[in-house]
Amino acid sequence: MKPVSTPDDLRLHWARPAADWHEAAPVGNGRLGAMVFGGVETARIQLNDSTLWSGTPEGPAQALDAVRAAGAGPERFAEIRAAVTAGDHPRAEALVMSFEGDYTQEFLPFADLTMRLEAAEPGSFTGRTLNLDNGVVEEEIRYGARTLRRQTWADRPAGALCVEIAVTDGQVDLALDLGSPLRELHRETGESGILIGVAVPVDGAPLHEEAVAQPLRYADESTSEGPERAGYDPYAALAVRVDTDGDVTARDGGWAVRGMTRALITVASSTAGADFWSRTHTPGQDGRTRAGHRAHAATRAELALAQGAEQLMTEHQWDLRALLGATSLRVGQRGSGTFDVERDLLSGADDALAATVMFQLGRYLLASASRAGAGPPANLQGIWNAELRPPWSSNYTVNINTEMNYWAAEVTGLGDCHLPLFDLLDRAAENGAPVARELYAARGWVTHHNTDMWGWSLPVGGQHGNPSWAFWLMGGAWLVQHVWDRYDFTRDADFLRERGWPLLSGQAAFCLDWLVEGDDGQLDTLPSTSPENLFRSAAGTPASLTRSTTMDMGLIRALFERCLAAADVLAIDDPLCTEIRAALPRLRTPAVTEGGWLQEWATDLPEVDPAHRHMSQLVTVYPLGQIDPDTTPELAAAARTVLDRRGPGAMGWSWAWKIALRARLGDGDIARDLFLEAVRPLSYDPAEHAPVDGSRWGGLLPNLFSSHPPFQIDGNFGFTAALAELVVQSHGETITLLPALPARWAVGQARGLRCRGGLETDLDWQDGTLTSVTVRRISGDGTAPVRLRHGDALVSVRIAAGQEIVLDGKLAPAC
């Protein structure tokens, strides 16, 4: 077994095996995710497949039929608008709830692979390490003079999870077991390994937000193999294959080997969900039969096994290192090495090191959870989940959480990891078009607060979800901002034409039809909510529905402007653009309350919770960039006052947003204070799902997963984006260097941070001052000048395609 780490790698170390799931180490290849527990006598690997969701492709359309049959539609929507206008909040909210379908489907756990080791003497565990540069978990166990080394990784080129075990100076015995929390329909064991087939629930939607205990519903309640289903057949198979040099036996559904010195284990899957997902790209492709799924999983595992450990590891490292090595950020002096998670990171002893680690951890997790062509995008838990009833169904919550998952994608060199999000948008737009037409008599497409792998587009809530979050129609308007960002960073006009324009224009058509003229001639969204906050009505009671929240207006303005920019790039002469140009000047602009903070609603309404974790009106600051200290100083000051009122801690994703907002406003030292809070350890048992002290603050779990609480991965991704924002910002053709560097982070370097316009930057700083910067053009034609700004220094340069410039800390040409 060859060493797979290099001296320049960044590694996380735990001295003990994981006692529970929140201590395990994550690996993933975009399709298969695994949590590696490690251990001596027994070691667990919990397995997920990103395409394993409850539900069926027909679910969204069936739900729309159900709410239409219950009376939801344009006529009732007109009644809602009349009730909101009249200030009759109870009636408006009751009517709105009739538009709510069930909750979305769930991302499900797949299986557990259990390894049991036996030797003549007791084993001593020397620790486990996760390498954030190559995605390999390494363990070492000593049995007297013998040493066992185990390496686990999720191999993208091979499409398999791989485990290599090697023993020096002796032999051990190994037993394997494979089990699933889902309904097992088929099991095969033999000398080559184990294979199972499971039924996937056709309905996992909770009855209401708190009801998480009701059983999952299967299509066929029998436990036998049963007949093949017509149409979508909810079935999945998982195969484990082993190559070893010992004496193998297979009986009672398990697998064992005696006297081995080496073993290579590969795991591969095949699911009906993956067939559905691939059909979004290959229309008319038939799904596999159940026997076909079992054969496909077995073949993939066998093909991986045939490559051998050395070739698998070589190709895996070539794949992942090429992706992760494109960008790096080092804060402080230490950017590589092995660091004990408990002693070096969760202790708070070195926040600069914590920044370096959290930046790379977020990139590693995104590269592990979201790969082009592998499956759906990263959900609320990435691709890692062990619960049959995960919090919030481990779905896509699109009023910030899904968007935050991808804030870091382009700027940190993971643009290819961004692509699965657009696959989901294609599905949401397909299902959202009939929802827009039949519920709101609108063109285009709409997505509300949640979606799932099937592209759910209705409001959720089961007719009792609070409209402050359930009846929010702007999910699509926010998600398509990522379409423009993808183009803006890459200048890929083919992507913009083929994938981007249909999504942008469809969402713009919906928003044009949704807007109504107010008494003053301006255009309103009606009804409108500000996720997920409430205001006090004239009667003093909490209410959610009003008109033209600041968030609505900011998202629609950005959407319209980006549609016009896209049409200009693509030389499209679309009548829709004429409508957009007429509507833009009539959109309401942000306002400031009498108290001096940026207004959340169209009028100065009292908040029910002034310290609410959501800061929805500040979408105008980050990520939309409509408010900043240079061009809109009064509004920037009002945005800063919102943050002051909201206060510091909340939960992982809210901290991440606050750090990014402070970075955009130039408040680097406050951003660092927030980061110090966010990376403290969670102070209670995450299985309890409630803090012992009654607070709502989250923190980091023992494996550095971010917590809402409970675990939610958007915080990890958000920290990476926010840390990048402290170091480099790009808007239009201007790149700002060290715009919000905290004073205590006086030393560091960045490599390969991407900037809008098809640019990439390297920079170094010492004593809080920029010492050098390199800017290179990686895409685009280079005809437009690029402005570089650092402090009071501002230069304009031209960088041709494939060229770079090197400047000193004063932005003068370097010698």
Image: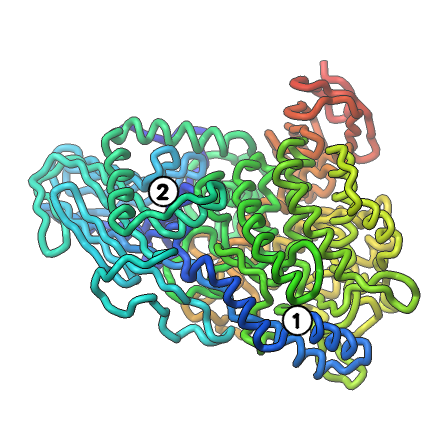
Q: Residue at x 28, y 27 (%)?
A: 310
To which residue does mark 2 refer?
129
Left or right: residue 306 compared with residue 689: left
The quadrant of the image that shows the N terminus is top left
What distance separates the C-alpha of mark 1 from that of mark 2?
A: 55 Å
According to the image, what is the colour scheme of the structure?
rainbow
Towards the viewer: 114 or 570: 570
Left or right: residue 410 compared with residue 580: left
Which amino acid is tagged 2? Thr
**In this orientation, does residue 396 appear?**
yes
Q: Are marks 1 and 2 in contact (CB under 8 Å)?
A: no
* Quadrant housing residue 428: bottom right
Which amino acid is tagged 1? Gly
Label 2 crowding class (10 Å Cα cut-off): few <14, some 14-19, many 20+?
Answer: many
To which residue does mark 1 refer?
73
Q: Position of residue 296 (x, y in %)?
A: 28, 42
Label 1 crowding class (10 Å Cα cut-off): few <14, some 14-19, many 20+?
Answer: many
**Which numbered disc, 1 or 2, marks the residue that appears first in the sequence?**
1
Towards the viewer: 740 or 303: 303
* Quadrant housing residue 752: top right
Q: Residue at x 61, y 40 (%)?
A: 499
Q: Secondary structure at mark 1?
A: loop
